[in-house]
Amino acid sequence: MSNSSSIRHFLLLPLADTRQLQLLHFCLLLGIFLAALLGNGLIISAVACGHHLHTPMFFFLLNLALADLGSICTTVPKAMHNSLWDTRNISYTGCAAQLFILVVFISAEISFLTIMCYDRYVSICKPLHYGTLLGSRACAHMAAAAWASAFIYSLLHTANTFSLPLCHGNALGQFFCEIPQILKLSCSKSYIRELGLLSVGVFLGLGCFVFIVFSYVQIFRIVLRIPSEQGRHKAFSTCLPHLVVVSLFVSTGVLAHLKPPSMSSPSLDLALSVLYSVVPPALNPLIYSLRNQELKAAVWKLMTGWFQEH
């Protein structure tokens, strides 16, 4: 038996048992990682450089891309390193830092997905009040509140989790540091405090999801009344990508953490964790750019301008 004061490192879950599969997973993760860097980097650059994209919708999309970049850069490089060098180690400090940063970015992503839904709701259901409800100052305040609340929430989680005495070894059943896996190593009843925080987080996350669903019910009621087919198409083209992103992120996250114990298996848990932590940051840029003509044109202009210069 050991306690947290004697634990210097944790052992992460290996992605594969054989060397060939480890190298295959390294190549797959590298491809996803580069796709996420390229896609989110292009969105950030296009929105920052394109003055006609300085609108609330694209401002929040830029923040979502930053959250996506941050979350995938927190987990995937370490997983690639472990697969390439056939190791499982992560230091105690590194695990705490990874957990803190990951919770910051995932919490911020949930906030910005909710804010983007509110933006779509106001633009379609209350267009006359759009300038008042989503002015530049209001957008800046919402973005600041999203990042600040994510930082505070993550700080509370990290401080609570790593203050618990750990006496059930140091092997985590996940390829990155995750709160439920660390709680399994605790030998103290004080983990109930952390479970309380997690419950608050789940409640807030479900609250955001209910708000998003309710908003889209209102949005689709209005959109279906638009007489012009072109108008309906334009409204759907801005709403559907966001709905797809929310559905993918929430469904895989909820299934990973709230599925019945009878459904648990190492391979299923690993697949679900990859689906909610690795795949969305790579898919989000593709989903948004394919359905949004303005963004697609701005990204194309940015890329052609770069190639012409070089």
Image: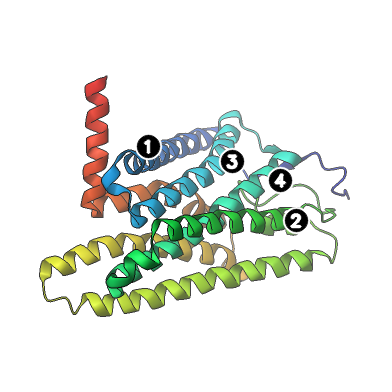
Tell which of 97 and 51 is nearer to you.
51
Whole-percent x and y of residue 129? 33, 71
Give the amino acid type for the residue marked by disc 3 in the picture. Answer: Asp
What number is the disc on residue 96? 4
Graded by Cα atoms within 10 Å as few (under 14), some (14 to 19) or many (20 or more), the crowding at tag 2 reads: many
* Cα distance in 3D space between marks 4 and 2: 9 Å
Q: CA distance from mark 1 to mark 2?
A: 34 Å
Q: Is residue 271 left or right of residue 122?
A: right
**Residue tagged 1:** 38
User: Callout 3 environment at 10 Å: few (<14), some (14 to 19), or many (20+)?
Assistant: few
Give the secondary structure at mark 1: helix
What is the x, y in percent for residue 59? 38, 51
* Residue 200 horizontal/vertical position (percent): 65, 70
Which of the two discs, 4 and 2, labels the residue nearer the N terminus?
Answer: 4
Q: Which residue is mark 3?
A: 17
Evaluate if marks 1 and 4 touch, with contact meaning CB atoms under 8 Å apart: no
Identify which amino acid the numbered label 2 is placed on.
Thr
**Which residue is painted at 60% across and 59% down in the image?**
149
Element carrying mark 4: helix
Q: Amino acid at mark 4?
A: Ala
**Which residue corresponds to mark 2?**
161
